[in-house]
Amino acid sequence: MEIITVPFGWLLNFLYQLTNNYGLSLILFAILVQIVLLPITAKSKKSMMKMTRLQPRLNAIKEKYANDEKKQQEAMQQLQKEEGATMGCGGCLWSLVPLLILIPLYTIIREPLSNMLGASDQVIAEIGKILDANMSDGYWQISAAQAIYEDPGRFADIPGITAKTLEGINFDFLGIQMGNVPEFAFWDSSWVWNWAHIGAVLVPLISAGSQILQTQISRKVNDSLVTNEKGIQDKEAAEKSQSAQTSKVMMWMMPLMSLWIGFSVPVALSLYWFVGGVIRTVEDTILTKKYRKIYDAEDAERLKKAMELEAIEAEKERIRAEKRAANPDGITDNTSKKKLQKKQQQAEEAAKAAAKKEYDAKKGIVAEEVEEKTTLSGIADRPYCKGRAYDPNRYNNTEEE
């Protein structure tokens, strides 16, 4: 934990010295932490968006190989490999990193004497003796840092204490003590209906409420990303997708967990969580727009290819229908395989051209006119037969004429 607590503790103390306001320094700290985590957030977002888009195609594979689990897994892995999607919970694991950072941050807030003010263990023990503090209480250092700020002379004679430690910390922010744990014991005689108590209760409530809103926004965005094999948005698959089911659970689980933690730890942690959540929502919106442009281009290409294949199949079926109508008895001429392949190639090219024309018309793309190339001989089947000594009447029977 020291890998995180030492640099983060120094950064939080630097911001506190810069602003002389603990709440404001914590807000700036939350913003900087989210900026540092932006590459991890981007990687997680890209992976989750990719998996969300593949969900209908993965469901189709599951239905196709419902009775063969081995082939099902192989086909799903092959699809994920082709699309460059993260297998398993790779994308989800990256999203847990901010939560893991929350644990050492909790230690920084809970132990400001050692993490922000740089006091040694001996100095901390002497401060505890002077205050007659219950050192088994996990939050006694917060009240000690506040006491040092209010009366530094009381601790000036402690051997080894530094000027930095004697500055203490003022946890007051907008009339709310950031170092206190919120309590809503209005039935207790010690409870006072003032802003300090009410504000401390509102911070975790607002934090939990904002998480519900953030989850709803994220869910709507993810649902719009689900497309079928043709690149067209699939609303039905979006509702049945795994991400949609996860979002429904997370929409209530995460805020409830945030609320429970908010009433168990100092107000400062709920403030950090709230600000971090707002920044993550902004980052999520920007990253979604960025990656959506890439994925929309991929979907457009998939749609174009699907339309071309459909046009080719339709042209083939039309030719087959014409042949069946012209030759109901099934008697065929002895036509060379090469000519048949050439005709089929020409039909496919014509179908692709028609599909492209239809796709460009839907997208509003004005197609450039291409000049048709004429063969040298004027004979489509023999485009290069005309040379310098070309004579169209060379093989005519002049005697009969």
Image: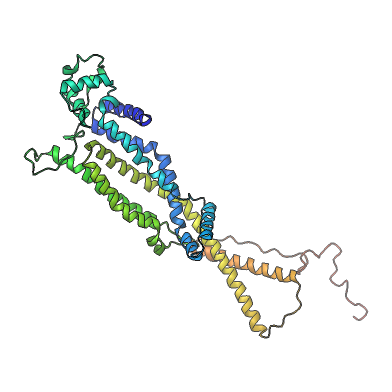
Q: Number of callouts in the render? A: 0
Answer above or below: position of 158 versus 203: above
Q: Position of residue 224 (x, y in %)?
A: 40, 57
Quarter where residue 244 is shown: bottom left
> Farthest residue toward the left?
189
> Farthest residue toward the right?
399
Answer above or below: position of 343 versus 169: below
- Asked if residue 165 lies left or right of residue 351, the reply is left
Q: Position of residue 325 (x, y in %)?
A: 64, 83
Quarter where residue 319 is shown: bottom right
Q: Is residue 300 in view from this perspective?
A: yes
Residue nearest the viewer, comparing 143 with 163: 143
Q: Position of residue 260 (x, y in %)?
A: 23, 45
Residue nearest the viewer, comparing 4 with 29: 4
Residue nearest the viewer, comparing 83 with 354: 83
Q: Position of residue 279 (x, y in %)?
A: 33, 42
- Asked if residue 384 lies left or right of residue 398, the reply is left
Residue in the image at 60% along x and 62% along y? 369
Q: Is the image coloured rainbow, by chain, by secondary structure, or in one colour?
A: rainbow
Residue in the image at 32% along x and 54% along y? 249
User: Quadrant where the N terminus lies?
Assistant: top left
Residue in the image at 25% along x and 47% along y? 208
User: Quadrant where the C terminus lies?
Assistant: bottom right
Q: Is residue 380 in view from this perspective?
A: no
Answer above or below: position of 130 versus 379: above
